[in-house]
Each structure stands twice: as structure tokens, then as C-alpha cells.
Image: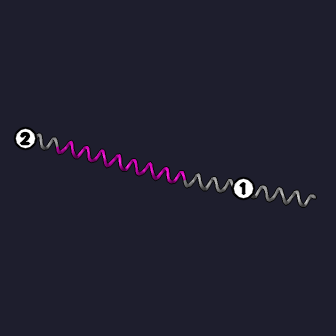
Amino acid sequence: MKKLTLLALTLGSMVVATGCHRNTRDEAKDDVEEAGDKVKDTAEDAADATGDAVEKAGDKVEDATDN
């Protein structure tokens, strides 16, 4: 009876530990994907801002040459 109880406790704790490890791994994967998305969004925002700045500079050059 004691051996069976110990075996059950050991197997139960192994199952719980495996589940916790899997959740941690999945959460880490999600965090990496989220960080990648943020980097991509930041790069897109920077590209848009650069494009806007170039367009404004072009407009100023155009205005200056018109006068």
C-alpha cells in the first residue's frame, strides 16, 4: 500500500511538472513572437516617419524652386 501511494505521488508530481514546463515553454514562445511583432511595428513606424520627412523636404525644395 505504501509503495503504491508513493508511486502515485511520484507519477502525479511528474505529470504536474511536465505540464508546468510545457506552459512555460509556450509562454516564452508567445513572448518572443510578441517581441518580434513589436520590432516589426517599430520598424514600419520608423519607415513611415522617414518617408513623411522625405516628402516634406521634397515639398520645401519644390516650393523654394517655384519662387
Numbered disc 1: secondary structure? helix
> What amino acid type is highlighted by mark number 2?
Asp
Residue tagged by mark 2? 66
> Where's the C terminus, which quadrant?
top left
Question: In the rendered image of this protein, does residue 66 appear above or below residue 1?
Answer: above
> Where's the N terminus, which quadrant?
bottom right
**Residue in the image at 10% along x and 40% along y:** 64
Say the numbered circle drawn on residue 59: none
- Which segment did they paint magenta? 30-58
For this orientation, the residue located farthest to the top is 67
Say the numbered circle drawn on residue 17: 1
State the CA–CA distance, disc 2 to disc 1.
73 Å
Horizontal relation, residue 9 to residue 34: left or right: right
**Residue in the image at 73% along x and 54% along y:** 16
> What amino acid type is highlighted by mark number 1?
Ala
Image spot of residue 48 (x, y percent): 31, 46
**Residue in the image at 26% along x and 47% along y:** 51
